Image (cartoon, helix red, strand yellow):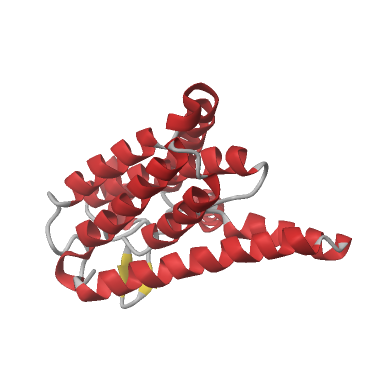
Amino acid sequence: MGFHKIWKNSRVTSYDRRAIRLAVGLSCLAGYVDASGFLGTGGLFVSFMSGNSTRLSIAAAEGRWVAMGLILGLIGLFVLGVVLGSVVARWYSHRHKPAVLLFVLGTLLLAAVLHTFGVPSLSTALLVVAMGAENAVFQRDGEVTIGLTYMTGTLVKLGQQVALSFFGGSKMSWTPYAIHWLGLVVGAILGALGHEQLRALTLWPAVAGAAALWAYSRTLRPASVSPAT
């Protein structure tokens, strides 16, 4: 089975090859932003809310109410970002990918400016909103079809495909999920390096990446999914 056919037959999904490249690129962007945000906040996530939920529970058990409030605020901002991204996607349903990505790009740009000029708290808040909104890029009928800022589901599907290969399924059907996961991992490595080397300018590569992905999304057909995006 050809690699492109493996992609098409996977749950990552009935999207064409160009849209799948966009998904991997966006996961890489999410990894970069999450790693730089994690290091900048001293151990809180800006895109991985399962991790923050665990930290929230630990803070509650230890009675650290200030930490609980901070983490709840981040989770609330992420949900707000999802809401805003979904609203944009609804408003521009025919071409929602570039519309949502333009919102993400603008939010990251403002976050980078604030970070550069020493306003890290507001910058972090905007990063969380941007990461929430990013998840609205790939959706159908209001439901997310490809998770971009979290990989638990992707790894579950990877394991399921490996198991299916033991019983006559394709030997390579797990590879799309592995590539999707690696996109986030590579982005996180770059984000950690950016935080270490660029300091106040660490978010500008994310802005450049978001701009490139927005431009790329404009080259996609209005309906990159069958039957409907």
Outermost residue to the top:
197
Q: At 64% from the left edge and 66% from the top edge, which residue is drawn?
A: 72
Q: Residue at (30%, 44%) from the top-left corner?
A: 210
User: The N terminus is located in which quarter?
Assistant: top left
Q: Is residue 158 above or below residue 88?
A: above
For this rendering, which residue is in front, 167 or 50? 50
Asked which quadrant contains residue 207, the reply is top left
Instruction: Locate residue 59, reporting x and y percent.
Output: 79, 59
Work out whether residue 115 or residue 204 is closer to the camera in this orientation and state it.
115
Q: Residue at x 21, y 72 (%)?
A: 228
Q: Quadrant of the C terminus?
A: bottom left
Q: Is residue 178 visible?
A: no
Q: Is residue 10 left or right of residue 64?
A: left
Q: Measured from the top left, where is residue 2 in percent x and y?
A: 27, 42
Task: State the image coordinates of residue 89 (x, y, percent, origin top left).
Answer: 27, 70
Q: State the residue in front, 24 or 120.
A: 120
Residue at (74% x, 58% y) in the render: 67
The image shows residue 28, relative to residue 82, as above or below, that is above
Q: Is residue 76 left or right of residue 176?
A: right
Instruction: Give x and y (percent) for residue 195.
Output: 52, 30
